Amino acid sequence: MRKHRSLVVLLAVLPLMGRGQETASATSAEDMSKLRAHFVEAYTRGAPEARTVEGYIAALRPDGSWPDIDYTNKEPGAWSTARHVSRLLSMAEAYNKSGHPLAGNAELRAAILKGLDHWTRNDYVNPNWWYNQIGVPQTMAPILILMGDTVPADLREQTMQRVLGRSKMGMTGQNKVWLAEIAFMKGLIANDPNFMAKAREQILSELRVTTQEGVQPDYSFHQHGPQQQWGNYGGSFGSDMIHWANIFQGTSYALTPQQWEVLRRYLQEGPAWALWKGRMDISGCGRQIFRDCQSSKGHSALRQLESMKSLDPAETEIYARLISSGTETGVNTLVGNKHFWRSDMTIHRRPTWYASVKMSSTRVIGAETCNGENLLGLHLGDGVTYFYRTGTEYNDLFPVWDWRRLPGTTCRQDQGSLEPNSKACRGRSNLVGGLSGGEYGLAAMEYLRDGLRARKAWFFLDRAVVCLGAGIDCSAPETVLTSVNQCLLNGRVTISMERQSREIEKGQYSLDRLKWVHHDGIGYVFPHPVTATVAAQTQKGDWHRVHSRESTRSVERDVFSLWIDHGAKPHDAQYAYVVIPDADVAAMPSLCDALPAAILQQTAATLAIASREGKLIQAVFFEPGRLAWGANSSIEVEAPCLVALDTSSAVTRLHVADPTHTRQTVKLWLSGKYAGSKAQYNEGREQTELTVSLSQESFAGQTVSPELQQGSR
């Protein structure tokens, strides 16, 4: 739930209220003075222009209401009636801002009190508890503080009891923070430092790493159960914590070093990774799929990083680098692969492009709907794969998307509801995870939904992403499609069957023996020619079907789509394609002849690739098994796991992850002789047996990288 930014602020006008008491000690008195000064600076910064406030005054009716506000509205998602208190807050900001043309204006004061009396007398409430316990009290508390003794005592008491009385500390995650913020403001109204101290503890108690709701050990953010919420609740969390860090600085309420560390690491290692060209990855936005959501959430995250430059001066250079890497015009130096094992999400960043995969498992909820938001997002956690170069590839595409062909998904083309819920959007398999080797990595999932099974893997390299699927079976009668991409159409689409390439006109084409497709600087290569569909056409829809508060007016967008049709009731079907972002169309033939990776194995049991030079092997073992390549090289595993073997440097690097999050160790057998922890060489079989200790508890699923030293065979 979003809130008025200035709800978090308060002021120095408390002495006007005449209800304060001398603080218990000189230290408390000094703290109160600093807190009020910090509040004033932050609070009055957002005061509106005089002409805006004068318009509010002129339109106010004698009963204290506004004619353009519907006071009968009960919309739980975006309650328009609450604009009444937000408007009063803006007016109170102007009334109290030093140097404002309307500061201390008697007509403005009278209008504020009339509007305050109207709301309190009518005591408007919403079916959504959030507005009653958080949203409205968050706005009302600063109004009472700002207006001080100008509010008649009986009106102040009624407002405190009826409106603020509904808000009490408790709950979890960001809701807990919001309720504690209101409590702090109530303590400031009463000039009660002891109560404020209790509220401060509640506010900052969420500045911790947890496996419950809040900041996770991998620096994703969970709310409403185990689901990624960087752009929704996590965004509000970051903004609020930065604000309170600013308010509390220099007082006994200030953040501890441990709390500072959690805040900086969350911002640097969590949402900063999901920013590209000023926008947030759709998979980081949560359920709030609305107009311009990527841009608005991206800019909010960038503002937080900008604020931290001054608040956390020891890390200024790091924040500056992250801001540059996340802006539209900056230089991206945040390069690498990162798997968020608590949220089943992988992000891969290169200097000029970005890719991500969002999955779900028995441990993780992939999507939700609430308050009429994200009404079609059932498959948003089903292996959705985005490729960004400019950052605008999917900009506001949601009204016209075919939501059964989301990029990267393998999906039945049925007619069932696409509305997500916690049960439907929690994966059916625990065999979902990822592995990060620094510059490269992989993600894998066993996908099970309504009679459809697929084993899928994504291998992230420096120049490309290799996408493999196998064991695709479906007992239901509908056609099953794997969507390679579905993004905004931008420029020419070029296709090639064998070695004959051509540009296509707008339309939809079912093509046999398709070798490659190029669109908008991205190449899509099929290692083995396939039958696939390419579309460059206008798609229609409306925002209302995505977001209930939006318009039903028809929307048209030109869309590029590419998908593979597995037919009805497929059995042991598979797919393979390589995505090469930042590819020139003229280079496509040579890229096809020299792909950055080769497929080593593609079965329902094992999906594996080797880099072109053969120095990097990446494998997904869905079952115990053996992978062999070259003349005499192999990896054998005793249990499902993810493995990367990197021999590109003098030191051999082995990376292992457990996608099930259940095992303590896993045994591997590598061809050749290696020395290292729990490594034993078998002379007869010319292989080394390794017992790898896996990450445990809240770090289960994280990549481990045991040290190896290669010996002579």
Image (cartoon, helix red, strand yellow):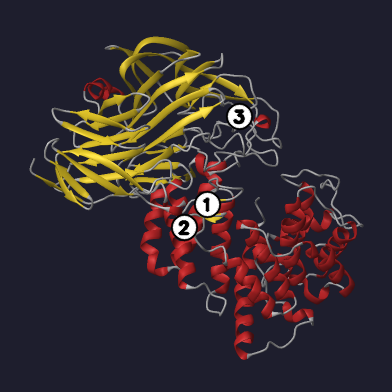
Look at the picture and state if 293 lies above or below 449: below
How crowded pointer 1 is (Cα within 10 Å; few <14, some 14-19, many 20+) is rated as many
What's the mark number on residue 443?
A: none
> Is residue 311 among the parts visible in the rendering?
no
Residue 3 is left or right of residue 581, and the answer is: right
Instruction: Indicate the position of residue 204 as horizontal and vertical percent values.
Output: 57, 67
User: Could you say which disc has been placed on residue 221 in the image?
Assistant: 1
Q: Earlier in the sequence, mark 1 or mark 2?
A: 1
Residue matched to label 3: 399
Of 425 and 635, nearer the camera is 635
Regarding residue 526, the answer to whether it shows in the image is yes
Which residue of the protein is positioned furthest toward the right in this rendering? 62
In the foreground, 182 or 491: 182
Q: Nearer the viewer, residue 73 or 449?
A: 449
Cα distance in 3D space between marks 1 and 3: 27 Å
Q: Left or right: where does residue 656 sit relative to residue 123? A: left
The x and y percentages for residue 486 are 48, 26
The C terminus - image quarter: top left
Q: Can you give x and y, in whole percent of width and height, for residue 697 in the image?
A: 44, 53
Q: Amino acid at mark 1?
A: Phe
Q: Residue furthest bottom?
A: 26
- Tag 3 or tag 2, which sits nearer the N-term? 2
Q: Residues within 10 Å of mark 2 (few under 14, many from 20)?
A: many
Residue highlighted by disc 2: 266
Secondary element at image label 2:
helix
Q: Which circle's residue, 1 or 3, is located before the other in the chain?
A: 1
Q: Kindly identify the amino acid type of the residue bearing the numbered disc 3.
A: Pro
Compared to 74, does 605 lie above or below? above
Residues tagged 1 and 2 counted as in contact (Cβ below 8 A): yes
